[in-house]
Image (spheres, coloured by chain):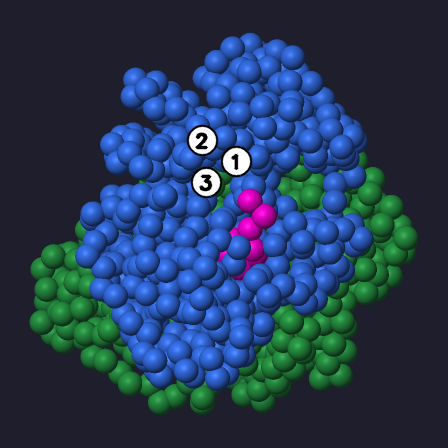
Chain colours: A green, B blue
Amino acid sequence: MNATLPAHLLPLQPRPVPAAMIDALKSRFGARCTTALAVREQHGRDESPFDVPPPEAVVFAESTEDVAAVVTLAAQHAVPVIPFGVGSSLEGHLLAVQGGVSIDVSRMNKVLRVQAEDLTVTVQPGVTRKQLNDEIRHTGLFFPIDPGADASIGGMAATRASGTNAVRYGTMRENVLALEVVTASGEVIRTGTRAKKSSAGYDLTRLLVGSEGTLGVITEVTLKLYPQPESVSAAVCHFPSIADAVATTIEVIQLGVPIARCELLDANAVRAVNRHDKLTLREAPMLLMEFHGSEAGVREQAEIVQAAATEHGGEHFEWATTPEERSRLWTARHHAYFAALQLKPGCRTVTTDTCVPISRLADCIALAVNEAQAAGLPYYIVGHVGDGNFHIAYLIDPAIPAERELAERLNDQIVHHALKLEGTCTGEHGIGLHKQGFLLDEAGAGAVEMMRVVKRALDPKNILNPGKIFRL
Amino acid sequence: MNATLPAHLLPLQPRPVPAAMIDALKSRFGARCTTALAVREQHGRDESPFDVPPPEAVVFAESTEDVAAVVTLAAQHAVPVIPFGVGSSLEGHLLAVQGGVSIDVSRMNKVLRVQAEDLTVTVQPGVTRKQLNDEIRHTGLFFPIDPGADASIGGMAATRASGTNAVRYGTMRENVLALEVVTASGEVIRTGTRAKKSSAGYDLTRLLVGSEGTLGVITEVTLKLYPQPESVSAAVCHFPSIADAVATTIEVIQLGVPIARCELLDANAVRAVNRHDKLTLREAPMLLMEFHGSEAGVREQAEIVQAAATEHGGEHFEWATTPEERSRLWTARHHAYFAALQLKPGCRTVTTDTCVPISRLADCIALAVNEAQAAGLPYYIVGHVGDGNFHIAYLIDPAIPAERELAERLNDQIVHHALKLEGTCTGEHGIGLHKQGFLLDEAGAGAVEMMRVVKRALDPKNILNPGKIFRL
């Protein structure tokens, strides 16, 4: 059972899908349009802890034309459409808060064009990041953005995702070169080109990346790729305290070390992955790091980092240079979420996602730890700390409203502290339903109104994933 | 004498500034508001070859409140406002094609907050890039974006500028973290935070970067900074042909070498800088490169590049490791434009700015060279070739319309070839007045209409630098 939608997001205005539209969809899509409850329910939720009624229909799109056809019908009938990739969003992005039709793009899963000589690739939105890397491995290139979940590229673009490699390679903001998008009228447009940079008019690509499906449905994504590094090395280092691990990270970033991954796991997270993945990591605050470069370059980076870690009490620096060892560690890191869910059967998580200027990170994490310990709610911390981004996840029983409320209060405190530190309420998960109040606190009424003006102009009938990011 | 505005940009609709507004400006700003012809003329042009009547008044703003006051008055009177930094735009961005008031922000030139521990800085828009680097040098950090001209940071943000260091450090798109902006109603908003990444709603920062003053007037810019590299080394290498220099560049990029600068100068450009800067560089196609990193890292990069260059006939690899030698070379590179202007007294330039996927660069430059030689117009080529971006500049006599028309025809051919190669008509100069037709060809009617819809929504009276990027 999930939690019900927070009161400040009610009342919803349901917008029923007229029978004529369902008929038109069934006539065009046949079995690829379904109103079966199980399918609708699967498409009416994500990894957020909310329960709302599912969409009225789900269409499995197989082409841009399919998507355009659904949106054109939706525009005619003023019905909401919600793009769906793999359902790994965390902030309620996929919930049909006003009803409507879910457009499942998971069958649009072709890697369309690999242009290895230009370090670019063009994919359909349903391609997942692991699939992409499997399909391009033979080229010697890779796509670095790694949010943990095997998310779809379309969904990652829509939420401006990032993850473990962002400290070196940037986020979807930096790595999407061009898009094909179906607009609110059902028209197909292209933004950007395969050129690495451009000053040609408004940056529609960047406007759409992170717009959470509210300005258009992404039907093609052109991405930057990177040469697989000559040498890769991963290391684990344990620290007496989280503060020491964070202090090491801050120093590494300030020194300009081009570290490829710099992940914090607190003792609780290590405990969870030990149990889940049958590892024997020391259950203390830990940095999990990765270095990319030439052999000499990797060695040089590692030496600087090891010196910084030692200065801050780091111990048991352990190296994993074989692909198997590395893969085992990173798999464990990516399992942290599911591993932690198993610590408290039936639980869900409320997860913070603040990101602050690097020098403020220790301050922000310290507050999170102190408050969580005082509150007595089970939690764990993982963080893309090289970017100043961390998550504290509270394990709550969704059947006990008081637990969710407590977690939300803690989240609230951390966000407002992060905003005082000149940070953001969300480094990579997005606003969705959950963080709309925080967005207002962060950006201010004027900037949010500017977003609303853009939304109203580009989607006058408010059919594209309505109710997300802000309410109109 | 400059060329007159191209016919396809006429007729203009002059929008006179009512006497009441001039009175209100003079009453608020005193001598900081002027209608003197010489000042207006200085603010009514940039480095583009067009002549239009100057703005009716110039206001020297000294604060965000000053800018907001001018824009508020302009909104009341539906009068155009044109932000002005140092006037180094190339595409007519600053021209008062509909009259109005120029807002000169050059006195807003304070570096407001250096947060060295976070690698960020916040500046007023009139700070120039050289001033910024002078003022932060003691911190051990630097701001890499370098468009050649000592442009203002506000102007660089407004045109999404880049330049010689972009191949490694990105453009203004990647390096602006946050903005303060005066909107079309005169309201002051802030976009972004000092966090390195964020998924908090629409990316208004990226929407405004590159919007050429048409969506808001930038009054504060927060930028990323970088640690000054431990070691810097520059090298010059000459090649038998431009094609060989470009082939070397393509290989270096495909190998993933993190080269910091990779600039092409053709023999004509070398000749011009030799004469202008009293250098004795060999007058052959040349790559001017710079490597940043640790001592070992720089050596390693240089070895890979030297091997690639040798394979492609590169000769006379010469190193410049002292700051003085490097500075002499880069100063010469930055003088290429002014040096070339001296090759043909009284001339102006028409400059292309295409940027293509790296593997297409040789093809695109070859076409440019062939066509220029066939046309017999004096030209030179410089290029940020590591990004796939180059400029061929035709030296024209502005008094001879046939020369400008010929140059424009050549530009047109190159742009359309670049678009076929999946590139962009402008890598870094912007659309301004000059490239509006190219924008339509590149982005398509649907995407340009999306830009127009955004513009109309955010600036309903069309007062913010009207007539630039597109016509409404």
Characterize the local packing of mark 3: few (<14), some (14-19) or many (20 or more) Cα atoms within 10 angstroms: many
Q: Which residues are magenta?
A: B149-156
Subunit bearing disc 1: B
* Figure quadrant of residue A78: bottom left
Q: Residue at x 76, y 71 (%)?
A: A363
Q: Is residue A44 visible?
A: no
* Figure quadrant of residue B19: bottom left
Seen from the viewer's position, the closer of residues A11 and B182 is B182
Q: Residue at x 56, y 55 (%)?
A: B152
Count of labels in the image: 3
Q: Residue B469: x and y, percent?
A: 33, 55
Subunit bearing disc 2: B
Quarter of the image where the N terminus of chain B is located: top left
Question: In screen coordinates, is A205 left or right of B337?
Answer: left
Q: Secondary structure at mark 2?
A: loop
Residue flagged by tag 1: what amino acid is it?
Answer: Phe
